[in-house]
Amino acid sequence: MTQIIVLPHEELCPEGALFEAQPGTSICDSLLANGIDIEHACEKSCACTTCHVIVREGFDSLGEADELEEDLLDKAWGLEPYSRLSCQAKVSGVPLVVEIPKYTINMVSEGKH
């Protein structure tokens, strides 16, 4: 199992969180399984940016983002060098520290689809 630390997020987990995740599981699925209701408007199909996270520690342990993910990340609010779409980033055996950005851009709910 892999330890994931989630930094405090005002709405989703005000106290932050610490839990174990099965290697090979996406960060998004790991968050959802542990009661952190991160938005995932495209149902984890790599078609939006609502599940964007910033991996503060352990980033290099994640597989490389493919071209589609990179293109979508360019549209994410608060993009940083260690940003990933949590639906695409698979947990390895290395502990992670994850930050969920304060805002997200949801083209569907904002009527821009």
Image: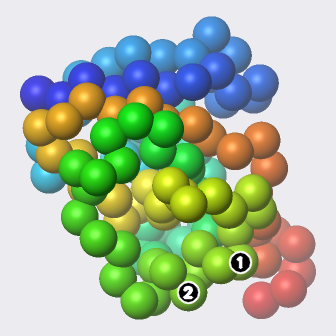
- Report whether 73 appears left or right of 63: right
Distance of label 2 from label 1 (alpha carbons): 7 Å
Colour approach in the figure: rainbow
Image quadrant for the N terminus?
A: top left
Q: Residues within 10 Å of mark 1 (few under 14, many from 20)?
A: few
Which residue is rendered at x = 64% and y = 21% of the image? 8
Report helix, strand or loop for mark 2.
helix
Image quadrant for the C terminus?
A: bottom right
Q: Nearer the viewer, residue 30 or 69?
A: 69
Report helix, strand or loop for mark 1.
loop
Residue 44: x %, y % from top left: 43, 67
> Is there any visible trace of residue 38 in the rendered image?
yes
Q: Quadrant of residue 67?
A: bottom left
Q: Nearer the viewer, residue 43 or 100?
A: 100
Would you place residue 7 above or below residue 61 in this image? above
Residue 69: x %, y % from top left: 46, 79
Residue 7: x %, y % from top left: 57, 24
Which residue is rendered at x = 88% and y = 72% of the image? 110
Which residue matches tag 1? 75
Label drawn at residue 102: none
Q: Amino acid at mark 1?
A: Lys
Label drawn at residue 71: 2
- Report whether 14 appears left or right of 82: right
Q: Amino acid at mark 2?
A: Asp
Residue 13: x %, y % from top left: 62, 22
Q: Residue lying farthest top?
A: 15
